[in-house]
Image (tube, rainbow, N blue to C red):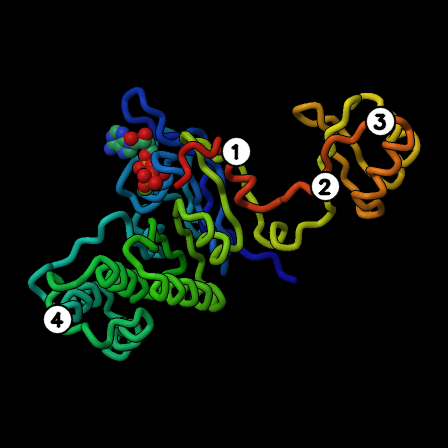
Amino acid sequence: MRTAATILDFQHVTKKFGKTIAVNDVTFQVKEGEVYGLLGPNGAGKTTVIKSIVGHLRPSSGSITISSYDLQKEFADAIDFVGAVVEYPMHYEYMSGYQNLKLTANMYPEVTKARIEEVIELVGLQGRIDEPVRKYSLGMRQRLALAQSILNYPQLLILDEPMNGLDPLGMRDLRNLLRSLAANGMSILVSSHILEEMELMCDRIGIMSHGYMIAERNMDEIHHAQTPVYLVRVNDPEEALKLLSEEYGEQLHAKEAVGGRIEVETTLISASQINRILIKAGIEVQEIHEKKQSLEELYLQLTGGAEIE
Ligand SMILES: Nc1ncnc2c1ncn2[C@@H]1O[C@H](COP(=O)(O)OP(=O)(O)OP(=O)(O)O)[C@@H](O)[C@H]1O
Ligand SMILES: [Mg+2]
């Protein structure tokens, strides 16, 4: 398989607001045809990352490259690849949705009337497109902003919290739309603090907390969690580790874990076998369970859980 090209290269970016370090030495890349999710609690730095890519903010240090153009030095060339919806989309309230779209379309000579109709259908606004925007709900405004952002077939689509204001059906539609845009080669960077949505929508997720990028996960790895890991609480972790490593070193990988526990990674031995081996050696097994490698657990573990909704 061909390695996908890098569309966005975000390298060691730091953004300070006075003493606040909103984004701290963050590095990540978005590849061609990939949906990349920035996940993190309120204040983690997601919007700051996004604003620095669309040119609303200037990073304090680091570099941002879009399709091999340096955003600082070749802004016009770089931004040409980007479509974006950041925070609260602004529209002309007294104009219709269609007129707002038409204004955006006027900036791109190659966007035809047929393309305008197409994006209206894609975002599901066909029934309401001739009404003034002031009558639109939040979800309808989001849809209109999305329509504007994809009019010109951007190579990189950036959406900050696009699920805001969408009802469950709207979320599902948006998810399907983003997946199909990505399947056609568009790269998408999306931010959210809604874990479940990100899990369903993204190929890769970067978890942010307090300005740092603290982990990156491929959703494939999460969905097809490889080797099971068992957490075993015993009265004598040291002895248990010694026993397991000496007798079954080839078949498993055991190490010490927190709270008087050991962690046993193995595909060859089941939880009940581990239990039996330890008990037979006179070690008391107080608890044994499979460690869930779900994104939720990882997220809670990494962000402390306190700030999650
Ligand atoms: N213009 C600004 N001036 C000063 N501080 C700012 C500014 N913009 C953001 N910050 C601070 O930077 C940090 C990161 O904010 P940011 O908006 O990027 O977080 P976020 O992850 O998008 O959060 P949310 O989920 O609430 O949207 C916060 O501590 C915020 O208060
Ligand atoms: Mg934000």
Identify the image quadrant of the N terminus: bottom right
Q: Residues within 10 Å of mark 2 (few under 14, many from 20)?
A: many
Whether pointer 2 and pointer 1 mark residues with C-beta atoms closer than 8 Å, the reply is no
Q: Residues within 10 Å of mark 4 (few under 14, many from 20)?
A: some
**Element under label 3?**
loop
Amino acid at dot 1? Leu
Lower position in the chain sequence, tag 4 or tag 3: 4
Q: Quick check: 238 above or below 151? A: above
Amino acid at dot 3? Ile
Question: What is the CA distance from the residue labelled 1 to the residue labelled 3?
Answer: 32 Å
User: Which dot, 4 or 1, sits closer to the camera?
Assistant: 1
Question: What is the CA distance from the residue labelled 2 to the residue labelled 3?
Answer: 20 Å
Question: What is the CA distance from the residue labelled 4 to the residue labelled 1?
Answer: 45 Å
Return the residue nearer the eye: 139 or 168. Answer: 168
Q: Quadrant of ligand 1?
A: top left
Q: Is residue 72 visible?
A: no
Lower position in the chain sequence, tag 2 or tag 3: 2
Q: Residue at x 39, y 47 (%)?
A: 192
Q: Which residue is mark 2?
A: 229
Question: What is the CA distance from the residue labelled 2 to the residue labelled 1?
Answer: 18 Å
Q: Residues within 10 Å of mark 3 (few under 14, many from 20)?
A: some
Q: Residue at x 39, y 38 (%)?
A: 41
Give the quarter of the image for residue 168.
bottom left
Q: Which residue is mark 4?
A: 131
Amino acid at dot 2? Val
User: Which dot, 4 or 3, sits closer to the camera?
Assistant: 3
Q: Quick check: 309 above or below 115? A: above
Q: Horizontal and vertical percent for residue 131?
A: 12, 71
Q: Residue at x 73, y 39 (%)?
A: 230
Q: Which residue is mark 3?
A: 283
